[in-house]
Amino acid sequence: MGLKWTDSLDIAIELYEKFPEQDPLRINFVDLRNKVLELEDFDDDPERSGERILEAIQAAWIEEAE
């Protein structure tokens, strides 16, 4: 079972592990969306993302990085 847009914490953990050099405080939503789509376990419709979802993923990633 793959990751869905609503799995913000799990996505954040995957992003933290795959992109350790990326500062989640300095990523724009276009780049964040593209990085999520690059995740091997991600399996959701790319068109279902939105600003609120990306904000939740970014916030979880920031928390994971701290």
Image (cartoon, helix red, strand yellow):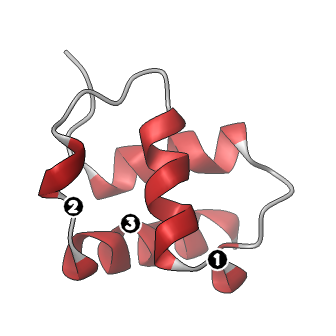
Q: Is residue 44 left or right of residue 39?
A: left
| Label disc, if present, on residue 27 of the rendered structure | 1
| Label disc, if present, on residue 49 of the rendered structure | 2
Say above or below: 19 vs 30.
above
Note whether residue 3 is visible: yes
Residue tagged 3: 57
Which class describes the residues within 10 Å of circle 1: few (<14), some (14-19), or many (20+)?
few
Q: Amino acid at mark 3?
A: Ile
Estimate the spatial distance between the alpha carbons at disc 1 and disc 2, rounded to whole Å.
Answer: 16 Å
Estimate the spatial distance between the alpha carbons at disc 2 and disc 3, rounded to whole Å.
Answer: 11 Å
Residue pushed farthest top?
1
Are the residues at dot 1 and dot 2 in contact (C-beta closer than 8 Å)? Answer: no
Say above or below: 55 vs 42.
below
Q: Secondary structure at mark 3?
A: helix
Q: Secondary structure at mark 2?
A: loop
Which class describes the residues within 10 Å of circle 3: few (<14), some (14-19), or many (20+)?
many
Pinpoint residue 20: horizontal percent, then vertical percent. 80, 50
Q: Amino acid at mark 1?
A: Ile
Q: Amino acid at mark 2?
A: Ser
Mark 3 vs 1, N-terminal side: 1
Which class describes the residues within 10 Å of circle 2: few (<14), some (14-19), or many (20+)?
some
Mark 1 vs 2, N-terminal side: 1
Q: Secondary structure at mark 1?
A: loop
* 27 vs 17, nearest the viewer: 27
